[in-house]
């Protein structure tokens, strides 16, 4: 199976499983999945977040997702238990389609490392 088909199948499986589990079958978009990853990485379980906290959760997720690509590195947990990352390399200027491919590949890799596809 070629890489493009394999990635597409894995992406569709992620969408299907997470949408079923967290959205009562409504289809989650990339932003919603990033938000869920942020909650997972924060590790504080289910709770209500303020708007600025939701943005911070998405930032945590993006940092975690792009860490293996050498863009970010975990730095420390603050006194409230929130993870902080430092920028290692600036992200290149990518076209919107290229950004989408990069983030989807990173999400697939993240879930693969969690054993999601086993």
Image (tube, grey):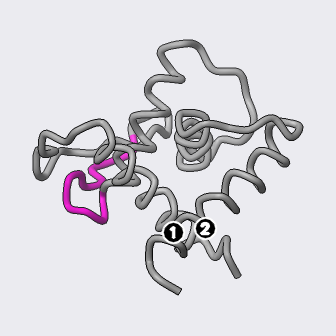
Query: Percent from the top left, x then y, of residue 50?
Result: 59, 14
| Percent position of residue 21, x then y | 83, 48
Q: Nearer the viewer, residue 105 or 56?
A: 105
Tell me the residue that label 1 is attached to: 7
Residue 33: image quadrant is top right
Q: Is residue 7 magenta?
A: no
Badge 1 element:
helix
66 displayed left or right of 86: right
Most distant residue in the right direction: 24
- Residue stretch rendered in magenta on the structure: 67-77
Above or below 55: residue 38: below
What mark, if any, has residue 33 been given in the picture? none
Query: In the image, what residue occupies the spot 61% across and 36% down?
Result: 29
Query: From the viewer's perspective, is residue 39 above or below residue 66?
Result: above
Q: Is residue 18 left or right of residue 24?
A: left
Q: Is residue 105 left or right of residue 33?
A: left
Q: Residues within 10 Å of mark 2 (few under 14, many from 20)?
A: many
Q: Quadrant of the C terminus?
A: bottom right
> Residue 87, located in which quarter of the rendered image?
top left
| Residue at image location 34% in from the left, 54% down from the top | 102
Count of numbered circles on the image: 2
Work out whether residue 80 or residue 48 is closer to the camera in this orientation and state it.
48
Give residue 109's position: percent from left, percent from top. 47, 67
Q: Mark 2 — residue?
A: 10
How packed mark 1 is, by other alpha carbons closer than 10 Å (few <14, some 14-19, many 20 or more), is some
- Residue 46, by quadrant, is top right
- Closer to us: 31 or 94: 94
Q: Is 69 inside the magenta-drawn segment?
A: yes
Eyeballing the image, is 52 above or below 111?
above
The reply to whether the C-beta atoms of the residues labelled 1 and 2 are less than 8 Å apart is: yes
């Amino acid at each position: 199976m070629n890489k493009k088909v394999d990635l597409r199948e894995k992406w569709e499986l992620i969408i299907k499983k997470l949408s079923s589990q967290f959205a009562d079958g409504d289809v989650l978009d990339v932003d919603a999945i990033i938000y869920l990853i942020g909650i997972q990485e924060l590790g504080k379980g289910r709770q209500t977040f303020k708007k600025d906290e939701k943005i911070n959760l998405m930032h945590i997720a993006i940092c975690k997702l792009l860490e293996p690509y050498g863009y970010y590195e975990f730095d420390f947990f603050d006194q409230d238990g929130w993870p902080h990352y430092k920028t290692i390399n600036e992200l290149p200027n990518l076209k919107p389609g290229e950004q989408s491919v990069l983030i989807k590949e990173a999400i697939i890799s993240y879930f693969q490392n969690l054993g999601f596809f086993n």
